[in-house]
Amino acid sequence: MSAQLLEGGPVAEAVLDDVRARVAALKAIGVTPGLGTILVGDDGASTGYVRKKHETCESVGLASSHIQVQAGDPPAALDEAVAAFNEDPSVHAYIIQHPVADGFDFNAALSAMDPGKDADGLHPTNLGRLVLQ
């Protein structure tokens, strides 16, 4: 059997159309889903990735929030960002963009996340659930 080229564009657009419909249904009952991002430092690739997440959120009707932690901030600034999103009812899920700047503990921040808001599924509880399924 020979390889078959799959066109990713139409598949991606179909997924986004489905998300738009789901977001519209939630908004119709008074819920605007929200995604948050935490970026620690100024890694160029990470900055672009996070920017694209927010553009996609806008295109499907999701609310989006962002917390920028500067590389020179104390490590507690990441803890505070995680706590803020954990407590914010308008943020239904969020990511901590990896890699984080030197001096910050990505794994500790993941562990502090509310596992129910872990958009990437990297919280230890969520990874455990994946393995046990």
Image: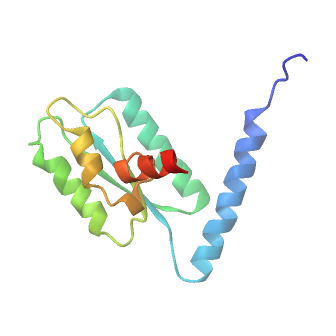
The residue at the point 26 percent across, 39 percent down is: 106
Quadrant showing the N terminus: top right
Q: Position of residue 56 (x, y in %)?
A: 55, 49
- Left or right for 102, reference 44: left
How many numbered tags mark residues here? 0
Q: Position of residue 108 (x, y in %)?
A: 22, 45
- Left or right for 5, reference 9: right
Of all residues, the one furthest to the bottom in this rendering is: 29
- Left or right for 96, reference 69: right
Q: Position of residue 42 (x, y in %)?
A: 27, 32
Q: Is residue 64 visible?
A: no
Q: Which scheme is used to colour this image of the protein?
A: rainbow
Of all residues, the one furthest to the front in this rendering is: 132
Q: Is residue 118 visible?
A: yes
Toward the viewer: 68 or 81?
81
The residue at the point 38 percent across, 53 percent down is: 125
Of all residues, the one furthest to the top in this rendering is: 2
Toward the viewer: 3 or 7?
3
Toward the viewer: 132 or 120?
132
The residue at the point 43 percent across, 34 percent down is: 48
The residue at the point 19 percent across, 40 percent down is: 70
- Left or right for 90, reference 27: left
Q: Is residue 62 above or below residue 49?
A: below
Of all residues, the one furthest to the left in this rendering is: 74
Q: Position of residue 109 (x, y in %)?
A: 24, 47
Image quadrant in which you'd find residue 19: bottom right
Toward the viewer: 58 or 6?
6
